[in-house]
Amino acid sequence: MGINTERDIEANLQIGPTDAGMVRLFVVSDGLEIPMDFSPEEAEEIAEEITTAARGARALAK
C-alpha cells in the first residue's frame, strides 16, 4: 500500500483553528474520528506541500 494505491473509502475532512491557537485537521470516516493538531508554522509547511503536490499532479495530467 502506498500513495498511488487507490481505496474506496469515503471521509470528511474539516480544517480550522482551535481555541488553543493550533490548526486542526479533523478526519471522520466510518465512525472513526482523527483529530490532528499542528502549530501555525507546521500548518503553513503542510499547505506548501499540498500546493507543490497539486502542481505536480496538474503537470502529470497534461
Image (cartoon, rainbow, N blue to C red):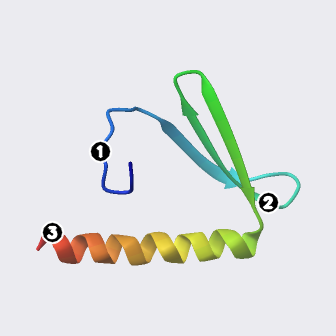
Disc 3: CA contacts within 10 A as few (<14), some (14-19) or many (>=20): few
Point 11% across, 74% down: residue: 62
Q: From the top left corner, tell me how far across and down residue 21 is, in percent.
A: 84, 61
**Mark carried by residue 6:** 1
Question: Disc 2 to disc 3, how far (Cα)?
Answer: 34 Å
**Mark carried by residue 61:** 3
Of tags 1 and 2, the one toward the viewer is 1
Secondary structure under tag 1 reads loop
Secondary structure under tag 3 reads helix
Point 31% across, 49% down: residue: 5
Of tags 1 and 3, the one toward the viewer is 1
Name the residue type under label 3.
Answer: Ala
Does 38 sit above or below residue 14? below
**Mark carried by residue 29:** none
- Farthest residue toward the right? 20
Q: Where, by quadrant of the figure, is residue 28 drawn?
A: top right
Q: Where, by quadrant of the figure, is residue 27 drawn?
A: top right
Between disc 2 and disc 3, whose residue precedes?
2
Q: From the top left corner, tell me how far across and down residue 26 is, in percent.
A: 64, 43
Point 38% across, 57% down: residue: 3
Secondary structure under tag 2 reads loop
Q: 10 or 1, which lies in front?
A: 1
Name the residue type under label 2.
Answer: Met
Answer left or right for 41 relative to 26: right
> Residue beneath label 2, please?
22
